[in-house]
Amino acid sequence: MTTGQKAKESRRRKDQALPGPFMRAIVQEAYGSADVLHEAQVPVPPIADNDVLVKIHSAGLDRGTWHVTTGLPYALRLAYGFKAPRNPVPGVDLAGTVEAVGSKVTRFAAGDEVFGSGTGTFAEYAAAREDRLAPKPANISFEQAAVVPVSGCTALIAVRAGGIDPGRQSSRGVKVLVTGASGGVGSYAVQLAKAAGAEVTGVASAAKTDMVRALGADHVIDYTTQDFADGSAHYDVIIDIAGNPSVSRLRRALTPAGTAVITGGEEGGTWTGSMDRQLRAVALSPFIRQRLTMIVGTQKSDDLECLAGLLESGAMRPAIDRTYPLAQVPDAMRYFDAGQARGKLAVTI
């Protein structure tokens, strides 16, 4: 073991007293609108052997957190709790400083700056698994880093499912359509496809088309006046994130052997959300030339490190619309729910 490694191990193994028994956090005791969220004092979370306790500098608001707050679709409650979330503190995205590490953690030590996903990140401290964190890029702020993990990883998985590798300029000539291009996942999908050399068309409302162009999209469709499936253009890959277009519309916009990757959709039934549409697409795919698939977003250290490299090189940048202090998380949720956000919303602790 080198001198530097010994010093890091000594720093990691030293007595890591927790910051105190209680901390500020946003909590909810029931499912519902933003009105169920309020600030309270809660215990600092314990950490398991493979966990890291992170002092939160900033957190991000994502669609999944909105789902957990509202308890919709109802099928979600099978995993999170029937009457209220088992963990009363919402939030997944985080960026901050390592406060303490579990006995089996080897990649991080107290004082390290990290970003990734944790449990209950709308708080002063949150526990996170070691394999869901990565070192924070030095050239971006905590607020910028905090809005990357959930949406950025979902976008990365989606473009890869479409055969696009953002790490290489291997998609020149490939035409990619991104629905919901002004949202959290969409804003990253546009940039990731461009980083691979693809020709990207983004779909957004008229008020947000300028933002999508600024992200690097070659073409922008205003969905209030244009239909991406009107036959005027066909795409090799469609990353379908928003709007809930029917499977038949997606197919009309694809090339004969194109790929549609479905992740999300704002609407759908109250029981299963947009999952019915995704399952119908996957069931149809084996019987046609076009490929229809779906993805579920996850956060892993390897993907976070890939995104960190793109952030460091400038190939990708977070688009933050607004930043809210912790006490104003309910306001952030209302703004998000109204569909007004251009890109991401950050919460500062």
Image (cartoon, rainbow, N blue to C red):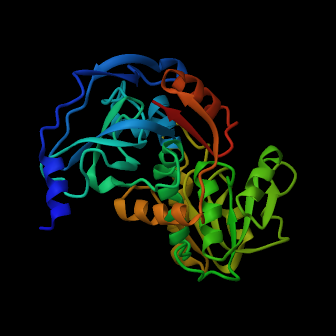
Q: Nearer the viewer, residue 173 or 80?
A: 173
In the picture, the quarter occupied by the C terminus is: top left
Say whether residue 340 is left or right of residue 276.
Answer: right
Q: Is residue 325 visible?
A: yes
Q: Is residue 33 visible?
A: no
Residue 118, position as x, y percentages in the image: 35, 43
Residue at 68 percent of width and 69 percent of height = 251
Say whether residue 59 is left or right of residue 244.
Answer: left
Image height check: is 197 above or below 183?
Answer: below
Residue 41, position as x, y percentages in the image: 33, 17
Quarter of the rendering containing residue 346:
top right
Image height check: is 86 above or below 95?
Answer: above
Image height check: is 164 above or below 13?
Answer: below
Residue at 74 percent of width and 55 percent of height = 212
Residue at 49 percent of width and 29 percent of height = 70
Count the marks: how many? 0
In the picture, the quarter occupied by the N terminus is: bottom left
Residue 238, position as x, y percentages in the image: 65, 67
Say whether residue 157 is left or right of residue 9.
Answer: right
Residue 224, position as x, y percentages in the image: 83, 48
Q: Nearer the viewer, residue 163 or 230?
A: 163
Quarter of the rendering containing residue 281:
bottom right
Instruction: Name the outermost residue toward the right.
Output: 225
Residue at 67 percent of width and 32 percent of height = 338
Q: Nearer the viewer, residue 161 or 249?
A: 161
